[in-house]
Amino acid sequence: MTGAPERAGPDRAPTRTDATAVVEAYLRCLDAADHPAATRLALGLLDGGWTVADVLVDVVAAAQREIGLRWLAGRWSVAQEHAATHVSEQVVGAVGARIPPAPTRGHVLLACVEGEWHALAARIVAEVVRADGWRVTFLGASVPGRHLVSYLHQAGPDTVLLSCVQPHRLIRAGRMIEACRAAGVPVVAGGPGFGVDGRWAAAVGAAAWGGSARDATRLLDGSLPPATHAGRSPAPDADEYLRVLRRRRDIVQAALAAVDPPEEDAEALANAVAHLVDALAAAIRVGDPQLLLDHTTWQREALPGSRNDRGDVLATILACCAEMLVEHPRSDRYLRAARAAPGPRTGRAGLRPS
């Protein structure tokens, strides 16, 4: 990095110019998996007047989005992505150690949806909220719903923050939110799993949605509706998604038999089919076929196998789903739309991690 970034006072976030330069320097640290250098950079920003939110949102989270794009484009391997994420996790811990230990506000519980292992963005939210004066209990990645409810009764938080990165996890997110509402605790949803601008958050019962850590602090500072009135429940006739989920195992087995993948790809393909069924069920649950279309657009590039074969594999999987769910009208309609959708012309679709 050439020169020090402009100082950010208490009322001024970093400008686009200085934040961009810092992110580039931070990415160089991640590229080298240089934890000490990345930590020195982050703590130096705090010493220079940047806030915890400035450092974690405008630098660490911004760099993590770029890492995701590099992985999706095939420029970084899984190993490089994991090494960089580990460095950022340590940086978040170092920044968090600078936060005064005595909270002055209420108690917030933060968890990732069961099955969701992308926890760095949620941890960033936890530290930014804690820096805003809240007591935060972070339960980490993939929290089983029943364990979350048990902890709610033990800890008695004012609000639950629930992170979901992947939309096909929305069924589980909805179940967790309903359980929190039953316990009288409102849920603020976060992450791209709830759709662009959180368009699916209300459909699964959330009181509100935030796209970033700063949004979380703003929502906590406001007035959330009572848990019993937050969001909306499924319509009485909208249980088709449950019938889809009951056929999940049969669909996976049928798709594997139809595709007949090489042994080394079989497990990955089985997981991909299961996720597609989950995405279909989630689309039906929130009443939006775009959720399934977004998922299949991504899967055209992410399925195991060669680039030339992936479109054929996806077509076979969708055909299996359609054949086994033909008696379900919404499934049939949503799957016909997915089968008719053209493949992407370039690159893979990314997910915003913060």
Image (spheres, grey):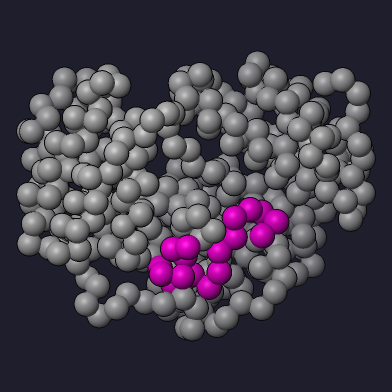
Is residue 14 placed above or below 236 in the rendered structure? above
Residue 325 located left or right of residue 34? left
Q: Is residue 225 visible?
A: yes
Task: Estimate the x, y position of residue 42 in percent, counting from the top left.
Answer: 79, 34
The quarter of the picture where residue 270 lies is top left
Please name the residue shown 40% across and 60% down the image: 173
Q: Quadrant of the N terminus?
A: top right
Residue 109 located left or right of residue 306? right
Q: In the rendered structure, which segment of residues is drawn in magenta?
A: 199-215
Is residue 233 placed above or below 326 in the rendered structure? below
Residue 16 located left or right of residue 158? right
Task: Estimate the x, y position of residue 46 in percent, counting from the top left.
Answer: 85, 40
Task: Estimate the x, y position of residue 193 in percent, counting from the top left.
Answer: 45, 52
Residue 201 lies within the magenta run: yes
Is residue 289 or residue 193 the one in the foreground?
289
Is residue 208 placed above or below 51 in the rendered structure? below
Is residue 325 or residue 341 the one in the foreground?
341
Please name the residue shown 22% across and 77% down the image: 237
Task: Estimate the x, y position of residue 249 in percent, counting from the top left.
Answer: 14, 47
Is residue 220 or residue 234 the one in the foreground?
234
Residue 277 lies within the magenta run: no
